[in-house]
Image: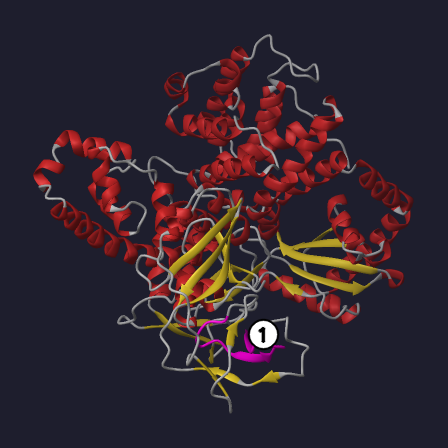
Amino acid sequence: MTKKKEITSIKELLDKVKEYDDNIDNLNKIVHAFNFAKEKHYGKERLTGDDYIIHPLNVAAILTDIQADYITICSALLHDVKEECDVSSSQLNKEFGEEITSIVEGFTKINSLSFSSDNEAMISNHQKILVGLSEDVRVIFLKLADRLHNMRTLWVFDEKVQKATAKETLDILTPIANRLGINRIKSELEDLSLRYYKPDVYFQIVEKLNQTKNERDNSVLEMQNKVSELLTDYNIKHEIKGRAKSIYSIYKKLNKGKSFSEIYDLLALRIFVNTEQECYQVLGIIHSKFKPIPKRFKDYIAMPKTNMYQSLHTTVFGYCGYLFEIQIRTYEMDKVAENGIAAHWSYKEKGSVKAGLQNAMEQKLQFFRSIMELKNENIDDAEFVKSVQSDVFDDTIYVFTPKGDVIELPNGSTPIDFAYKVHSNVGDKMVGAIVNNNIVPLDYKLKDDDIVKINTNNNSFGPSKEWLNIAKTNQAKNKIRGFFNKLDKEEYLKNGEDNLNKELRKKKISNNEFFKTENFDKILKELKCSNLDELYINIGNGKFNPNQVINVIYNDNKTKEEIILDKVTKNDVTKLTIKDDIIVKGIDQIKINIASCCKPIPNDKIIGYITKGYGITVHRSICPNINNLTERIIDVKWNEQTNKKYPTNIVIHTDDDKNILMDIIAKTSNSDITIQSINSNNNLYDLVVLVTNDEKLNKFMNDLKLINNVTSVERTIK
């Protein structure tokens, strides 16, 4: 990888800016920002030994490569003055205005965090970065350029710091650069990160490339000449460049098990023409002369990537039988391919946004819309990052609305995910889906290029809780949970108020006396509720019981946990009489036991096992303890008239160690479920519940899945 030459003067920076912006006022503002930063950083040096101003100067230079506007260039020159020189926001605002100050503040906010791949830090940093990103993308342009210059000088640090910095760059920043389509910065960041994170692998690849460099250069030159002659014969104005494959992209393919010889695009050409029509002409001409490899053609012009990348890709047998990957694009497409979203970002001008650019961007910025939608969901930090990682950074598919709008979804998404991606109301009112003119079930896995139509009904009650098991995206799951949480809150609010008033009447305490100001303030403070509605909701969902609220004032307090444990352990559980609940074919009088391993409940498919001296033990038909038995098996079935409660085991898994015991109990308050026992261990809750049938059990389990931080609920066999 060629070492990049640093600039050392404002003149060099201005020369680079003038290549795309020669407005005198803009250039003067850049000079003002440089002089201000130089004065504030005066006397300071970086670990490299350079004057500190060299760093912001080169960060700004990196941004000129993607033709960033003068606002971003000024922000780059000033990006460290708050953090390193204690310059106040008011001072910045006075000197440079609100827009530059806002970008510098956004950068300072995300840069003050210590990036790490540890889970806790990733949660904070992903959120801060992505929220900053959704407010003004230029904050991220600046962050990427700052990191790139720091990576170029990473040699000054010890190996531990080098590896940590390289890993966080690969984990956090290069995926964002890729999403923004800024290939120019992304590729260099990836190569530098690999250089420090896995130096042995990096230099092995470099050595192999150097061994074949002369041969590859000659082959590329010969192929370039042949293609150029061919296009000239057809009077197509063009430019051809040999394209070097990045070291990191070679590493990724080798890491997937490919050998060096199997990497097709080590030999590569990039052809530039003036129009989209000429791109397709060039493709046809090349295929008429050089045999293409099947399934290696991709049309990103008709189907652009969501980061706006457009090109035709093909791989052909070229000079001397070597395989060549050829990319064909217009000059405008190349600008977007290298600079990504920066090539078309509509900056504010005099308080308004250019309407044409804004409309164009509306079709392009699905990434930002995804982040904003996630940001607005009422979810905690861990769930936010989980959503971002799965919904925004996972492998994606591209499907269409009937009008031809492109919708981006994670691989494995269903029509439910599509509906909620379009709009919450579409998801809530969905009654079916049609894909490519065929009716499909809601668990259908969408594929690239599917055309999806969602059938809705305004009279629909809303989503089913079963959809939580079908949806792929956390965005859809959060909206489904939100729908039911809203319904629950309304019911909890009413029940909570009724239950508290009932208990007050029972204890002959008047509402006016109980809710006088000093009592009311004490109750809200003690129970950590922000208002009366929240108090009623917490009573209605079982988090508090009415006596607990009353006892805040009348001093007969028990802890929440004690009340919950009382509720669980003091249930009167009558010993089960199984007689007449299980019907044994051809036998009237025989002792029947329920298997303790699988604990069947009414409506379960069951099977009987004739024990020696203990009658018949009834198992669920899926119980592994009898799966391989053929002898002494007898047909049994549930009596459909039974309405007794039978015990069974369920296990709840959570993604952190927050105590959700009260939330679990709350879900029993509106269901015909009795909890017989609870054992908790870190992120796992093992319950024995009493239930009359499998339908009520399934409803209870779906209710449990609505609890924040619950990752799975399953019925177990022990």
Left or right: where 490 falls relative to 661? left
Location of the N terminus (image quadrant): top right
| Residue 208 appearing in the image | yes
Vertical arrangement, residue 87 with respect to residue 110, above or below? above
SS at badge 1: loop
Left or right: where 494 falls relative to 152? left
Q: Position of residue 191 (x, y in %)?
A: 72, 40
Q: Residues within 10 Å of mark 1 (few under 14, many from 20)?
A: some
Left or right: where 13 falls relative to 1? left
Q: Position of residue 423 (x, y in %)?
A: 37, 60
Q: Residue furthest bottom?
A: 586
Q: Residue at x 24, y 35 (%)?
A: 552
| Residue 243 appearing in the image | no
Vertical arrangement, residue 224 with respect to residue 348, above or below? below
What amino acid does circle 1 point to?
A: Ile
Residue under pointer 1: 622
Q: Residue at x 58, y 61 (%)?
A: 301
Pick whichever, 558 or 345, lies toward us: 558
Location of the C terminus (image quadrant): bottom right
Which quadrant holds residue 3? top right
Which quadrant holds residue 597? bottom right
Pick whichever, 618 or 35, lies toward us: 618
In this rendering, the count of numbered labels is 1
Q: Is residue 331 magenta?
A: no
Q: Residue at x 71, y 37 (%)?
A: 193
Q: Residue at x 27, y 53 (%)?
A: 489
Pick whichever, 660 or 132, lies toward us: 660
Q: Is residue 614 magenta?
A: yes
Q: Position of residue 462 (x, y in %)?
A: 32, 66
Residues in magenta? 600-622
Q: Residue furthest front?
A: 613
